[in-house]
Amino acid sequence: MLEIGKNAPELAVLNQHNKQVRLVDFKGQWLVIYFYPKDFTPGCTLEGCDFAAAYSEFKSLNCEVLGVSPDSVDSHKKFAIEHKIEFSLLADTESKVCKAYSVWGQKNVAGKFFLGVNRTTFIIGPDGLVKEVFRNVQPKNHVQEVLTKLKYLQM
């Protein structure tokens, strides 16, 4: 399990613009990486739209936002266009990043068990270390919680 104080695992996956995004691209700045199960589902749409609405505030805090799910580049592109999402949505189609960040695992929805993404958010510091982990995220009000913690960490 990835914990506070550990090095954030490297990532190298395509975003909705078919451009490779790597962790090293953000060295020296804060980074919020949020993992979500699926584009266009109610909770994921709420979370994505809330991050999009607050994106300029994150940027003003020298912080980039990345969304990660197992959806395809094409799905992310459609999702980003429809919901006016400016930050990168990473297409982790093989779940390698999800596994590296320990967010891939068994889920139980209405008595059905399957493997999938457990909604989780990480705040990564400019030094590449995990500064905060939000597990079992509930989308409503989550972005404000992340912003509050980010401001506290930057004090």
Image (tube, rainbow, N blue to C red):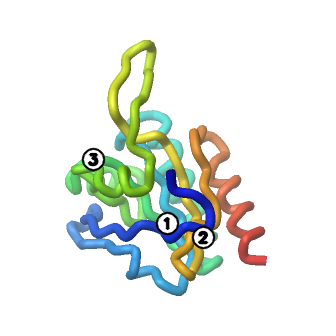
Report which quarter residue 101 is drawn in. Answer: bottom left
Q: Tag 3's secondary structure?
A: loop
Q: Tag 1's secondary structure?
A: strand
Q: Earlier in the sequence, mark 2 or mark 1?
A: 2
Query: Image quadrant for the C terminus?
Result: bottom right
- At 58% from the left and 64% from the top, the residue drawn is 123
What separation in Å lies between label 2 and label 3 (alpha carbons)?
A: 24 Å
Q: Which residue is mark 2?
A: 58
Q: Say which mark, if any, is on residue 65.
A: 1
Q: Position of residue 61 (x, y in %)?
A: 64, 77
> For mark 1, does the 10 Å Cα neighbourhood hold few (<14), some (14 to 19), or many (20 or more) residues?
many
Q: Tag 2's secondary structure?
A: helix
Marks 2 and 3: which is nearer the front?
A: 3
Q: Mark 1 and mark 2 in contact (Cβ < 8 Å)? A: yes
Q: Which residue is mark 3?
A: 71
In the image: residue 44, left or right of residue 20: right
> For mark 2, does the 10 Å Cα neighbourhood hold few (<14), some (14 to 19), or many (20 or more) residues?
many
- At 43% from the left and 13% from the top, the residue drawn is 111
Amino acid at circle 2: Phe
Q: Position of residue 1 (x, y in %)?
A: 50, 51
Q: Mark 1 and mark 3 in contact (Cβ < 8 Å)? A: no
Amino acid at circle 1: Val
Q: Position of residue 137 (x, y in %)?
A: 58, 42
Q: Mark 3 and mark 2 in contact (Cβ < 8 Å)? A: no
